[in-house]
Amino acid sequence: SAYGLAADGVPAFCRVQAVAVPTPDSHIGIEVWLPAAAWNGRLLGTGNGGGAGRIAYEMGMIEGLKRGFAVANTDMGTAPDINRTIDHPQRWVDFGHRATHEMTRVAKGLVAAHYKAASFRSYFEGCSTGGQQGLSAAQRYPSDYDGILAGDPGNNRTHVASYFLWNHAALNASPAVKLSSAQWTMVTRHVLAACAGKDGGAPGDAFLTDPRRCGFDPASLPVCEAGASGDACLTGEQLTTLRRLYAGPVNPQTGERIYAGLPLGSEAMPLGPQAQADPATWPDQQFYPFRWTLRTAFDPATFDFDHDLDRVDARLASTLNANDADLSDFARRGGKLMLYTGLADPAVPYSEVIDYYDRLSATTGDSARTAAFARLFLVPGMGHCFGGPGVTSMGQPFESTVPPARENDALMTLVAWTEGGAAPDVLFARKPAGQGAPAQER
């Protein structure tokens, strides 16, 4: 059965597999699970990750089913490999937004027919690409969902890809500029020594509580002696590369910022610089927008962040990006949005998520009106979507457990708020007990 569904206490359900073909070149894989008993009267759409290309069972479907939801997911129309869609612009539209809408349409029809339900609530949860799916739904299809939980969203898709390319190119400029795993850990250790306990957290924390309050200077890092190298120091070339990553991508002609830089304290996290530097895996995972637009002319080492990026944006931004901060139609229908982001996420820097929420508030025109339908939660010490040295388990997608209490469950907090409860001011995250350590809560 899919993803070992016979194990781990998954309740019985009816599994429906479908294909949506909104255009002759579309082929959108969809899967919907309908609980055999104890349906909670709600649909949960779940997000995917990266370039999708398969049903993402492990990104919320299983845990949603355990909570009693009917659940749905889509391969976003990019199966079996997003890099094989270069000459298929309709599949780019599917990936950008249409596949999620088709999944929702199909799932709602199945739920209504199976349970003979005239009406029911619909929710969506996703992180990373799933976060993009959630924001895209709120912007483009405001009636699809009553509540949306969107984490670490890659909503500025063409520019987050540019951030990945910027870092990859910098770290592959020559063999001498790459940092070892031990060196990345050393950098984070120095960041924490400079700022932990001075940013609202405890001095002994293994993470930053608020990286915005950290004034770390890379010049304070130990520099290797001339001609020497090692895990306890950086060469001059490596230090220059590190500064380039912290600065983030900018237009070389205008100086305009393209995307945020690497967050302090995220240097050694999964999906961080070490993964982004890998020429064997990273390009196939993240560079599809450039291949779609530039085809064989694309070369990571020679990409022009001025003219080439303009070409990418001109062709793909309106399809892939979910940057519109006008959610008035979604709010008018009573929709609720909960955004969250890890403050140690090296893949989608937290400042990008804060910027989106600030633009949302500016568009709404009043912070209180914004807070009435949209809330942003910053998670100290969390990497990309889950995990990290902080206390980060709050029932979000990518977590493999259902929290024991509703106060620890972001999804059910969203449900309660959407269905008439009080707006949440805080989320109580947990770190489950393990390896002799008691459970923690923050």
Image: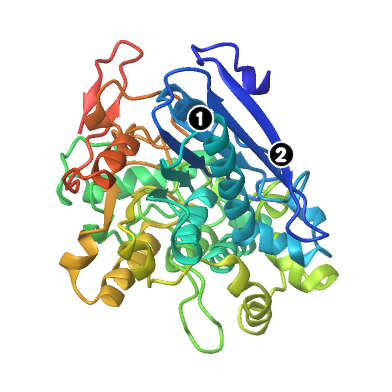
Q: Along the polypeptide, which appears first: circle 2 or circle 1?
A: 2
Q: Secondary structure at mark 1?
A: helix
Q: At 75% from the left edge and 72% from the top edge, which residue is drawn?
A: 293
Image position of 215 with respect to 59: above or below: below
Residue type of the residue flagged with mark 2: Ala
Q: Which residue is mark 2?
A: 18
Instruction: Determine if residue 287 is in view.
Output: no
Toward the viewer: 151 or 61?
Answer: 61
In percent of width and height, residue 400 lies at 46, 25
Q: At 24% from the left edge and 15% from the top edge, which residue is drawn?
A: 438
Q: Secondary structure at mark 2?
A: strand
In percent of width and height, residue 6 lies at 60, 12
Q: Which residue is mark 1?
A: 115
Image position of 141 with respect to 5: above or below: below
Q: For the residues labelled 2 and 1, say whether their Cβ atoms are less than 8 Å apart.
A: no
Q: Is residue 292 left or right of residue 161?
A: right
Name the quarter where the N terminus is drawn. top right
